[in-house]
Image (tube, helix red, strand yellow):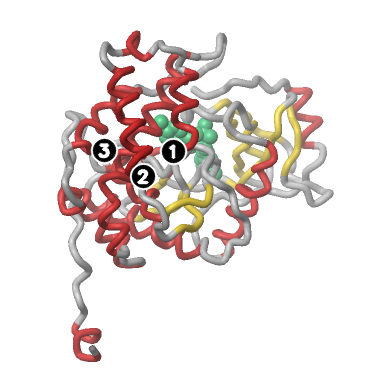
Amino acid sequence: MAVYTEVSDEDLRGFLDMYDLGEVLSFKGIAEGVENSNYFLQTARDRFILTLYEKRVREADLPFFLGLMEHLAERGLECPLPVRNRTGQALGRLAGRPAVIVTFLEGLAVKRPGAGHCRAVGAELARLHEAGRDFPGRRPNALSLGSWAGLFASADGQADRVAPGLAARTQAELDELAAIWPRGLPEGVIHADLFTDNVFFIGDRLSGVIDFYFACTDALAYDLAICLNAWCFEPDGSFNATKGRAMIAGYQSVRPLEPEEVAALPTLARGAALRFMLTRLVDWLNVPPGALVRPKDPLEYDRKLGFHRKVAGATEYGWEPVRETATSTASA
Ligand SMILES: Nc1ncnc2c1ncn2[C@@H]1O[C@H](COP(=O)(O)OP(=O)(O)O)[C@@H](O)[C@H]1O
Ligand SMILES: N[C@@H](CCOP(=O)(O)O)C(=O)O
């Protein structure tokens, strides 16, 4: 459960006095997530999520995240909308933390995604990239290549305590990725954390996307690489190319990849695996005393990294060229 900051009844009452949400009927800490403190809030008017931003979210970045959710929602993406208080502000302070109320999205996260889910997520990711094209905000990715050595250093030489050999393996990977990291790929707004817990489905229909608090400006194909990592591996550690094929085809049904993005995919997938291994490693070694949180396993991403290191090309992820349609062939 991710609740780092407890909210007293009195603080909640004071905060909600600023809003027109009606009487509080229920208020509970949420048993998922690892980054921020989230509460389910039911009032006489509706259901909402109250988020208190914790360690990795910089307060200065909140206008980017909140503005992005509004921008994407205006363009038809199902995502939470920040709720404004009586003075028109979405961002407030509660229990000493920056805090925001957002609308509640219907749907459930899938625990064991199938190829159909992967296709839907690929298509939604590309829609998000397209909808983000005219978003005026810019936020460099604070968790990209330039931050990884510092993250590793903050594990303070303790990686081998988690698994023997992890420190040397990680250092070698950092060095190699620094030398080969692709530059100049098409960039735009990326979600950067589109894991299974951040996508909701109603039946087989994708009903919404949440958790924009890692969103940033970076290579669009890096976002796809994050999703391949998060959605297309089986619990036994094997990569499921059928799911990969479905995800990439879904993505390309909306936004075909450029040749340089296809060529970069194996390196981007390695980088994505390393990024999540590192944040998980740091969190694993630093669980705050008293916090209700279950840290995620860094070794899951160390194993995924082992797979990506052996990948020779994007076809191993299921990439196939976009097929020419009858119309485009006829008009060519
Ligand atoms: N807008 C929302 N609608 C419905 N449920 C939500 C919403 N936002 C968050 N949740 C619930 O809260 C959980 C944690 O939210 P998330 O944003 O992933 O947390 P964190 O910022 O800690 O990663 C989600 O898994 C989901 O169950
Ligand atoms: N998705 C990341 C951790 C961030 O978790 P979330 O609760 O924000 O989805 C991981 O799996 O390491």
- Residue 327: where, in percent of width, then height? 23, 86
Q: Circle 3: is it few (<14), some (14-19), or many (20+) Cα within 10 Å?
A: few
- Respond yes or no on whether mark 2 lies under 8 Å from ligand 2: no
Please give left or right for residue 173 compared with residue 45 in the image. Answer: left
Residue 26 can be seen, yes or no? no
Between the residue at mark 3 and the residue at mark 1, the CA separation in whole angstroms equals 30 Å
- Respond yes or no on whether mark 3 lies under 8 Å from ligand 2: no
Q: Which of label 3 and label 1 is nearer to you? A: 1
- Please say if 68 is above or below 145: below
**Amino acid type, residue under disc 2 in the picture:** Trp
- The residue sitting at 35% across, 55% down in the picture is 205
Residue 245, picture quadrant: bottom left
Residue on which the image places disc 1: 145
- Residue 62: where, in percent of width, then height? 66, 43
Q: Earlier in the sequence, mark 1 or mark 2?
A: 1
**CB-based contact (under 8 Å), mark 1 and mark 2:** yes
**CB-based contact (under 8 Å), mark 3 and mark 1:** no
Q: In this rendered view, identify the residue nearer to me: 125 or 111.
A: 125
- Residue 54: where, in percent of width, then height? 61, 28
Residue on which the image places disc 2: 181
**Amino acid type, residue under disc 3 in the picture:** Arg
Figure quadrant of the C terminus = bottom left
Between the residue at mark 1 and the residue at mark 2, the CA separation in whole angstroms equals 8 Å
Q: Earlier in the sequence, mark 3 or mark 2?
A: 3
Q: Earlier in the sequence, mark 3 or mark 1?
A: 3
State the SS at label 3: loop
- Respond yes or no on whether mark 1 lies under 8 Å from ligand 2: no
